[in-house]
Image (spheres, rainbow, N blue to C red):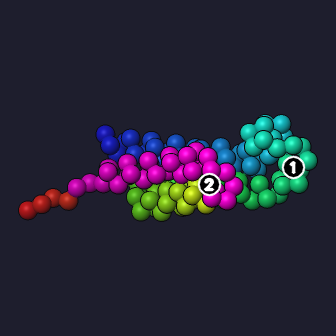
Amino acid sequence: MLRTVAAIAVAIVAVEHFGILVLEVFLWDHEVGREVFSMTAEESAITKTLAANQGLYNGFLAAGLLWGLIAGKRDVVIFFLLCVIVAGVFGAATAKPSILFTQGAPALLALVLTFLARPRAAIG
């Protein structure tokens, strides 16, 4: 049961980062992206190449999480969750404090659940 909950939490983090990819790569310079990121048309036009680059990295995070889930590679899942947490902390420190809660916290929760779902070694 706990493994399933952990896998769902990891999948949610992956879906969130695919969503960020879509926003940053495809919708940054459109009305939707400007509204989400509180930008003017001029600001989004100037920064759209940088945003696309950021979005691509978010896509890689999501792909890594899904790869780990599908392949059943717990160490891969842990690595990519740690990457998301570090990115969330860095984003909070350098861009917008709420990133810690919107990206870092879900990844931290998924990481804790992943550790708790670890099979226990038999004693004796």
Q: Nearer the viewer, mark 2 or mark 1?
A: 2
x and y percentages locating residue 60 in the rendered image: 62, 58
x and y percentages locating residue 77 in the rendered image: 46, 57
| Residue at x 40% of width, y 45% of height | 6
Residue 59 visible in the current orientation: no
CA neighbours of label 2 inside 10 A, class few (<14), some (14 to 19), many (20+): some
Which segment did they paint magenta? 91-120
- The residue identified by callout 2 is 92
Dividing the image into 4 quarters, which one contains the N terminus? top left
Asked if 84 appears above or below 34 in the picture, the reply is below
Mark closest to the chain's N terminus, 2 or 1: 1
Figure disc tally: 2
Q: Is residue 66 left or right of residue 45?
A: left
x and y percentages locating residue 46 in the rendered image: 88, 54
| Residue at x 75% of width, y 43% of height | 37
Dividing the image into 4 quarters, which one contains the C terminus? bottom left
- The residue identified by callout 1 is 43
106 within the magenta span: yes
- Viewer-side residue, 61 vs 32: 32
| Residue at x 63% of width, y 58% of height | 93
Identify the main secondary structure in magenta.
helix
Asked if 16 appears above or below 73 in the picture, the reply is above
Q: Which amino acid does label 1 sit on?
A: Glu
CA neighbours of label 1 inside 10 A, class few (<14), some (14 to 19), many (20+): few
Callout 2: SS: helix
Q: Which amino acid does label 2 sit on?
A: Ala
